[in-house]
Amino acid sequence: MSKPKGFEKPTGVKDYLPHAVAKLRRIERDVLACMDRWGYEQIMTPTIEYYDTVGVASATSDQKLFKLLNQRGTTIVLRSDVTAPIARVASSLLKEQPFPLRLSYHGNVFRAFEEEGGREAEFFQTGVELIGDGAPEADAEVIALAIASLQAAGVPKFKIAVGHVGFLNGLFEEALPGRVEAQESLKACLLQRDHVGYRDILRLLSLEEPVRSELEGILRLRGGQEVCDQALRLGVNEAAHLAIRHLCEIWDVLGAYGVQEHVLIDLTMIGDFSYYTGMTFEGYAAHLGFPVVSGGRYDNLLAQFGRPAPATGFALKTTRILEVARDEAASRGTTLILYAESQRAEALAEANRRRDAGESVVTEAARTAAEIGTAQALLRLLAKAEPGKPIEYRGRRYASLAAFGIEEGGEA
């Protein structure tokens, strides 16, 4: 294998240039502030964890984990999500804290994908975990907060699809008792949104017509309250009925929050993590094919760390949101202060005064006659320019300009 060139990076990672970083930090700041207003306290967990604890509990398949060996030969992993590390903390450092726990986070996570897949190996997430509350109100709270967080991030148009793992498990067990391989194949198609493949598998299973029709009919179970009503009329087992009733209660609470317009019930929804045990949801932004938020209920995860408790939460796909969120507001901009050496003290004092007032300021010294001539030419152009027009200087743009000692006749 040839040695990589100095400017090359491993596949799946990227550099974020200043404009993207400003946008990313704005999203992070505004979303975490939104979560704080809902009573969620921010937590930070390590980038590396033990494989035998968090790595195993994360439900990320082994081939997608980045594994390392420390100096003692113990296998550690780069975190593949933040939910499992928070479950570890909730069961140890926070074990004396009463439930419910409301925790928020922002951080980078790592997953190894096939190189030809074009997916990112490192990306950012901002999310919450609500631990210790198994009620429908808790699920509705995280969905409503996900909606508020997307709005705080500046995502202009989106839709949240909500489903329930228990419904699909109950439906498939009733229709295909004991046929685990067939059930998993159908679930895999639903996870990939491959409805053509789903129908093809149904045809290959040689099912009786009423069963095949019922299984195919779930592809049309997308909408509002009427979807719950239709699902309750299906000939499914008690577990599936309980799941639907739980979704109905969530829907009612979302109505009280006033956010039903952003939500649809989708009974083909199935979470992409094996630790989901109940409600799951994904949010899609207009003109973007990948989800920008996902979450759900995971009532069995904390038991792996010795503190059994119900839990629910979500993660915003912050890196994807960069593509659709509004840009960092340009109204503040950056002020350029140009000065001749004779006016250095006055210019830098003015820069400090403006920074203390919250402005972004860049200072440039004009030392030579040529540099002062360039600055003087800029001042002459600005005198004729329309107010509020951005200022171009040495290949960069500024919102405003202040000058010290470089007016016509200024000293070099």
Image (tube, helix red, strand yellow):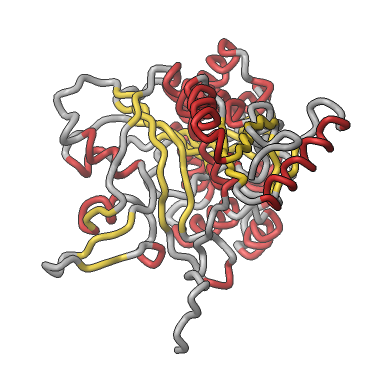
Q: Quadrant of the N terminus?
A: bottom left
- Count of numbered labels shown in the rendering: 0
Q: Quadrant of the C terminus?
A: top right
**Residue at the spot x=25%, y=21% of the render?**
99
Q: In the image, is 379 to the left or to the right of 122?
A: right
Q: Quick check: can you spot residue 344?
A: yes
| Between 98 and 399, the one nearer to me in the picture | 399
Q: Quick check: can you spot residue 212?
A: no
Residue 253: x %, y % from top left: 53, 15
Farthest residue in the left direction?
A: 72
Q: In the image, is 274 to the left or to the right of 95?
A: right
- In the depicted structure, whether residue 289 falls above or below residue 361: below
- In the depicted structure, whether residue 285 falls above or below residue 7: above
**Residue at the spot x=57%, y=42% of the render?**
269
Farthest residue in the top direction?
A: 256
| Between 20 and 302, the one nearer to me in the picture | 20
**Residue at the spot x=59%, y=51% of the render?**
190
| Between 363 and 147, the one nearer to me in the picture | 363
The quadrant holding residue 381 is: top right
Residue 218: x %, y % from top left: 65, 41
The quadrant holding residue 334 is: top right
Q: In the image, is 260 to the left or to the right of 176?
A: right
